[in-house]
Amino acid sequence: MAGIRIIPRLDIKGPHLIKGIHLEGLRVVGDPHVFALGYYSQGADELVFMDIVASLYQRNNLAGIIERAADQIYVPITVGGGIRSLHDVRTMLCSGADKVAINTAAVARPGLIAEVCERFGSQCMVLSVEAKRRSGGGWEAFVDNGREHTGLDVVAWVRQAVALGAGEIMLTSVDQEGTRKGFDVDLVRTVADCVTVPIIASGGYGRPSDLQQAAEAGASGLAIADALHWQRATIAELKAHARAAGLEVRP
C-alpha cells in the first residue's frame, strides 16, 4: 500500500485554532499560523484548514489565514467551511489554497460540485462528509459541523458526488472525532469500496495501530488533529509508525 499522507487538520473559529470532541465542546489551542508552520517544518504532506462556524454564519473567514500560510508553506492546502459559490472557491484559490472542501452547500445544491469541477478541475473539488452512524445500520451525512441532519445515506451521497466530478473525499466520523478511539474503519472501508477517488479519513486517531487500520480500510490520507495539537505525537513519529507497519510514506 503506497502513498499514505499524514495531514494535520486545523479547525478554526475566528482567529483561533480550536479542538473539540464530536465537533463540540470547543477548546482554544492557539494561533493557527504558528501550528501550521510547525507542522510544515515537521514534514506534513498536506494541511487542512476548516472554518467550523462558517456555515452557521454563511461566510468563510479564512482568506487572510490562508494567504499568510501559503506565503511560507509549500505543501497542498485544503480549505473548507462556508464555501457556497464559484466566487468563494476562486477567493480561496487566489488566497493560496490548492483545494476546497465543500459539505453544506453541496448537499443543498449538488450541481455546485459539477460547476466547481468544470471551472477549476476535479482535483480541486473535495467533498467533505460528516458521517454519523445510524442505529439501524449505515451512516447519515450531516451538515453545519455535524449539527444538522440531511437524511442522506453517506454511501449514496458519496457515489452521487463522485459521479458529479468530486476528486477526493474527506470523510469525518463525528462519532469518533476527538475520542482517541480510532478511525471508523468500517465507514472508511464501506466508502472506499464504492468509489475510486482518494479518501482522507478524519476523526479518532489515538494510537499507532490506527494508522495501519485506516490505510488497510482504503484511506490514502489520514487527517489528525488532537494528537498533534496536544503534542502526543509528532509527524515524524507518525510516519515512523506507518513505515514500521509496512506503509509507504513520504520522507
Image (cartoon, grey):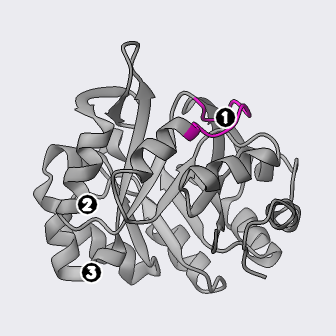
The quadrant of the rendering that contains the C terminus is bottom right
- Which numbered tag is attached to residue 232? none
Q: Look at 48% across and 68% down and name the residue there.
A: 78
Note whether 58 is above or below 222 in the view shown: above
- Which numbered tag is attached to residue 162? 2
Question: Callout 1, which amino acid?
Answer: Gly
**Label located before the other in sequence (2 or 3):** 3
Residue indicated by mark 3: 121
Compared across the picture, whether 220 is left or right of 116 comes to right
Question: Callout 2, which amino acid?
Answer: Val
**Label located before the other in sequence (1 or 2):** 2
Query: Magenta segment, which residues?
Result: 176-185
Note whether 233 is above or below 147 in the view shown: below
In the image, which is nearer the foreground, mark 2 or mark 3? 2
> Dot 3, crowdedness within 10 Å: few (<14), some or many (≥20)?
some
| Residue 19 within the segment the image draws in magenta | no
Secondary structure type for disc 2: helix
Residue indicated by mark 1: 178
Pointers 3 and 1 in contact (CB under 8 A)? no
